[in-house]
Amino acid sequence: MVSLSQAEEILQRVYGYPRFRRGQKEVIQRILHHQDVLGIMPTGGGKSICYQIPALLWDGITIVISPLISLMKDQVDACTQLGIPASYLNSTLSWQEQEERLADLRARKTKLLYIAPERLESESFLSLLQSVPVSLLTVDEAHCISQWGHDFRPSYLKISKLLNSLTTRPTVVALTATATEQVRQDILDHLQIPAEHLEFTSFRRTNLSFSVLHGVDRKEYLLRFLREHPKQSGIIYCATRKEVESVSSYLNDHHFSVGKYHAGLSDMERSSVQEKFSYDQIQVMVATNAFGMGIDKSNVRYVIHYQMPRNIENYYQEAGRAGRDGEESECILLYQPQDVFTQSFLIENSELSEERKKWELQKLQAMKNYAHTQVCLQQQILRYFGEKTEDTCGKCENCLRSTHSQKEEITSTAQMIFSCIRRMREKYGLSLVSKVLVGSRSKRVLEFQFDKLTTYGILQDWKEKEVLRLCQQLVGDGYIEVVPNSSGFPISKLTPKAWLVLKGELDVYRYVPKDEERLVEEMSTPREQLFETLRKLRLIISMREKVPPFVIFPDSTLKEMTRYVPTDEASMRQIKGMGEKRFERFGEEFLREIKRFLEKQPLEKVTNNSTSKNVSSKEDLSKPKSPPSHLVTYEMYQAGQTLDQITHERNLSLSTVQEHLIRADQEGYSIDWKPFISTDHKELIEQVTKQADTTKLRAIKEALPEEISYFEIKAYFAMLAQQKLEASS
Ligand code: ADP
């Protein structure tokens, strides 16, 4: 019998990986013992290796049933690059091509054959399989067997027929990233895999950081995010085709070249845009959930959900398309309460049976809970999938909140909002509530005579958008509920928790970020420049070889090269992901490119005495160290830009930019404050400060005319401190 150490040898020699990932070893071990196995592993967990390595070790043929025609070609290309004799059969091939491939199979020139499940309907194909030794049958995306899965494929039910028709039953390995109890059981039953042969790998994806953003202006957010992540690949998922059209044209209008993908486009349009995305010619794809089943791109750095999906299974699968190469990646859900309403409306009005509708609504509720939870987001997902875990990820928005935010008490503001909702008889949506609170003169407000309410204009110093955002946060925290009225429009109602607040029995807090925004500019370090150079070379090779760039090398391998800067064969061979075949084909080219780069730009090597394959890379090259945001503002200001210009260029609010200058001053950076304070105002502030005998900002602000801003007062104090310092030195 073949041993695990032989499998390890292949992992290192062919794939260039030093060790198996969690779960891979267990699945392979069972296969090598000729035991059928169901392997449940998260997306990106490395399922392919689980059957490819046994395929290489065994004499017979491995059949891989995969529902994703578009993925097959990429998978076979990836095998070919590694020197694995693989092939596929599906409807995209001509009759002649199919015949040639079948001939190769009969001649045993093929070790791995990928087929679509529909092929199992063909009697001639089934009888051909009788004449070749099939040693392993792989059922990829095995959840397609289950009617409870999100992607049931009736042809998958033919697999048991295939198994019965073969004279010798091959070993069966079923693989999936969907792990709910029902789906699991269906797979085991249908393929007759003993329950104890289930190998479950935690769904934890340690390289993903999750966040849920409530009530942000979504389009504005996307613009900002794309500006901040200029060279990264990402997917933006929208719920409908219409939304995909609107978001993609909005981004294109703002000079971002993004692709769009949905089922309403022609086959040709879809495959062309998908290819461009695979080849890194388009960085960002705006898509419905129709996009993704067929992509295998490993360097997707972020997945943003513009709308909330209807359940956690879909969410985790879509979000999980980020970071398949193991590099740090982000998964962001832009949550709006209306999304819950839209999804429940779609479920209610679907053709599903009543039982199924109830089930789908329960799953929607779990998704909603995810969006509102204060606990670790990764943990919440894992628990949903049945993992009993207490570990927090330490990097999701909720985990970080405690370190990066400050708690602010907002009980009285919340009370104002709640009593306004009550006075509007809990019959209207949050946007109208916000309008009333800020004292808007809009037609609807006047029509309903809401300007007569005592709560009208009670938050007049606020912007309507800010109030709406706060209202949505209060929904998120369970004080307000958004539910459809009898005509189907979302209306806001108070929950028992809000009543406690109104009675003064409960305080309300919110978290406000200490540093409201992240840095816009990414400083380009020499290592990043090398990474870019290698990426370009990879693109050129991928065009030449007609395969997507990540098939040549995943980003993680390029990052390793950037870190260890190999300049000779021996060190290049040590790079993680550099298998024998890959070195033979591309090693020299990459070595040349690195040397050329070093001639222009010397780079310190990371010498660790040991090789990269044995060392886990601690330095995170994906996240360059950037100067703190307030210092970027400071530099821009010192370089002569006005606050307005900085606000505009950095897409920040004026108050944030002003705060940046104050902070820089406090840290000892010199600023000339005079231009910010008019002589009249200076005198007034001086007077009030003396009279009130206080330096408390709020007291001073309240005693001054309204037009004098907090910033002016702070600038005044900063200037005073400066003068004192100068006098004493
Ligand atoms: P899945 O099918 O589970 O989503 P893949 O088989 O496509 O995942 O693998 C995802 C990525 O992980 C690929 O780039 C693959 O080369 C890489 N990978 C797989 N196994 C290992 C390993 N043991 N060490 C390092 N990288 C691995």
Image (cartoon, rainbow, N blue to C red):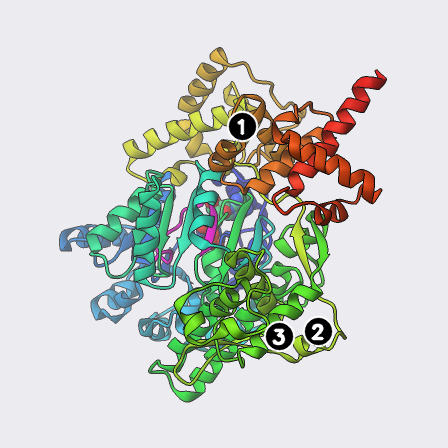
Looking at this view, is 370 or 604 the one in front?
Answer: 370
Question: For the C terminus, which image quadrant?
Answer: top right
Q: Residue 501 — which label?
A: 2
Label whose residue precedes the other's in the sequence (2 or 1): 2
Q: Which residue is mark 1?
A: 523
Secondary element under disc 3, as helix, strand or loop, is helix
Q: Position of residue 661 (x, y in %)?
A: 64, 32
Q: Is residue 301 on the magenta stretch?
A: yes
Q: Quadrant of residue 239?
A: bottom left
Residues rendered magenta in the picture: 291-305
Q: Residue 419 — which label?
A: 3
Q: Amino acid at mark 2?
A: Val
Marks 2 and 1, how far apart at CA: 47 Å
Q: Position of residue 622 (x, y in %)?
A: 55, 36
Q: Is residue 456 on the magenta stretch?
A: no
Q: Amino acid at mark 1?
A: Met
Secondary element under disc 1, as helix, strand or loop, is loop
Secondary element under disc 2, as helix, strand or loop, is helix
**Numbered disc in front, either 3 or 2:** 3
Marks 3 and 1, how far apart at CA: 48 Å
Question: How many C-alpha atoms fall within 10 Å of the one at disc 3: few (<14), some, or many (≥20)?
Answer: some
Label whose residue precedes the other's in the sequence (3 or 1): 3
